[in-house]
Amino acid sequence: MSDKLGELSHGGVVTVVVLAAWENASFIGDDTASLKLFGAVLPVHAVVRLRVEIRKNNVWLCGAPEILSQPAPEAQVPIFNSTTGPPFIPLESCGVIVFSEATKRVLVVRDYHTKVFIDVQFKLKAAFEGRIDGLPLPLMTAHIREWAVEELTWIAEWKLSKVWPFATAERLKEWNPKMKALDPQIKQLYRAAKAEIARRAAEERDSEPITAAWGFPKGGAKVVRGRVEQPAESAVRELAEETQIHADVRALQHPTDIARPGGTVVDRFFVLRRPDESGAAAGGWDVAAIEWRSLPALMASPEFARFAPILKILDSSEGVSEERAGGAGSESAARSESGQAGAAGPATD
């Protein structure tokens, strides 16, 4: 049994501060680590006692949380991955921006799912595993007009192997009892998908199909060998999983926190300079494609506007080789790997 997040190996009881609520999850932390806990939306700033377990290197809530107190935000204890001090802004994920010295191009990846459909996918999985009661259909269909046409078809035709490419036949069989219990809601969901397909057909929307977004390789921290990953460790693992590029954490440069829309959480990105573009390939079920793009094209793209602070570093004539992820060459670098920084929230399995 453990009483610190950073000491988790198989699970136990932990007492944490709730940093932020984010859809069907909460960011929690103590003075050793912080994580994104799926399947629980807890009162922000509360001190909470939780029983958790490790499943496939992710932290999951077991049973109902016990709220011990609800202090004012200024009464919070220091949190390991606080990026700015109170009010604490938790890390959502960590990633790598790969730059080829030979071609002066940057590696980008395209998600298998659109960002709005990832939330639908998660809510379905959470309901089928009994971690939430029922399907929150209004939330799931709120952005249905932004789903890709393929995603609409998967739901309308109930192609679960497309919704979850990682799901084995055994796992789908395990979900069957919950799916049967949720059948009325499932039917409402695929009727909504069919209605959206019909609406697009009437408006000839297929001539401009919606596709999943392009971005940089990134993901949340996991518990590895009984220890929560540090940001640089999460970043290189996600890079390898999504692009087949293997890097040493010591090669990462310029850790920079990039705010998500709304400013509730941030993503931490590192720069990795490589001699050329060799060795990159799409990997993992959640990456549909990879592509090398010129730096000017990325900087001119609205899709990558929030990454301007770190893209400007690559565009600078000054070298970045002296500023490493573990160094103190800048305020962001010192903050990222010092005792004031910690792990991002774990990704879904």
Image (cartoon, helix red, strand yellow):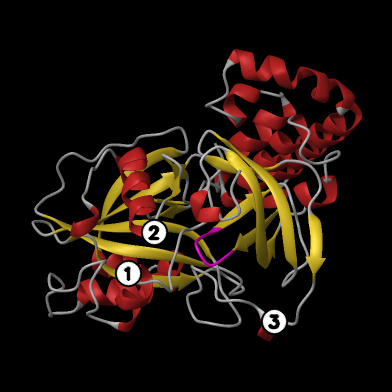
In percent of the image, x 62 and y 13: which residue is there? 170
Q: Position of residue 307 (x, y in %)?
A: 39, 70
Q: Looking at numbered disc 1 in the image, what kind of residue is underneath it?
A: Pro
**How far is mark 2 from mark 1, CA to CA?**
9 Å
Above or below 224: residue 298: below
Q: Which residue is mark 3?
A: 73
Q: Position of residue 34 (x, y in %)?
A: 54, 60
* Dot in front, 2 or 1: 2
Residue 147 makes an appearance in the image: no
Q: Which mark is residue 231?
A: 2
In percent of the image, x 84 and y 50: which residue is there? 138
Q: Position of residue 156 (x, y in %)?
A: 74, 29
CB under 8 Å between discs 2 and 3: no
Q: For the stretch drawn in magenta, what is the main secondary structure?
A: loop
Q: Quadrant of residue 241?
A: top left
In the rendered structure, does residue 31 fall within the stretch colored magenta? yes
CB under 8 Å between discs 2 and 1: yes
Q: Quadrant of residue 58?
A: top right
Q: Which residue is mark 1?
A: 255
Q: Looking at numbered disc 2 in the image, what kind of residue is underneath it?
A: Pro
Earlier-in-chain disc, 3 versus 1: 3
